[in-house]
Image (cartoon, rainbow, N blue to C red):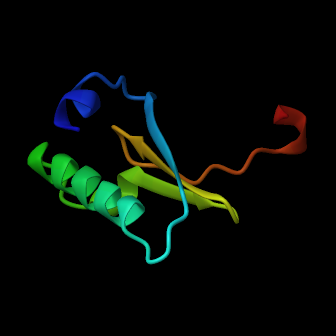
Amino acid sequence: MARCLERLSNDGLLVACRGIQQPPRDNLKYLATVAAALRARGIEDPARHVLIVRDFLAVCTVVKATPWTRRISRPSER
């Protein structure tokens, strides 16, 4: 995981999607691995770098080398 993160540009994304399992395990393990790799890179708050999207079939974990920011686009920018 650390090598994958090293290869990301500032705007690059690392995405992993897994089916939902009961009880939940793989997605939680992946999140823990990502958080550990980010901490090993000196990132104190890994939560600012991770986005998790879920539907009824899968969970997608999206990791960014730089923190996510909130940006609301205006209708003229779409």
Residue 53 in the figure: left or right of residue 26: right
Q: Locate the C terminus by quadrant.
A: top right
Q: Position of residue 53 (x, y in %)?
A: 59, 57
Q: Position of residue 44 (x, y in %)?
A: 18, 59
Q: Nearer the viewer, residue 2 or 68?
A: 2
Instruction: Give the residue furthest to the right.
Output: 75
Name the image quarter holding residue 23: bottom left
Residue drawn at point x = 37 percent, y = 51 percent: 49
Q: Position of residue 7 (x, y in %)?
A: 28, 22
Residue drawn at point x = 82 percent, y = 45 percent: 74
Name the image quarter holding residue 27: bottom left
Name the image quarter holding residue 46: bottom left
Q: Locate the N terminus by quadrant.
A: top left
Q: Up-down: is 38 above or below 24?
A: above
Instruction: Give the residue furthest to the bottom.
Output: 23
Q: Up-down: is 64 above or below 44?
A: above
Residue drawn at point x = 17 percent, y = 55 percent: 36
Q: Position of residue 15 (x, y in %)?
A: 47, 39
Q: Up-down: is 28 above or below 8?
A: below
Residue 2 in the figure: left or right of residue 21: left
Q: How many marks?
A: 0
Residue drawn at point x = 45 percent, y = 29 percent: 11
Residue 42 in the figure: left or right of residue 50: left
Q: Nearer the viewer, residue 18 or 31?
A: 18
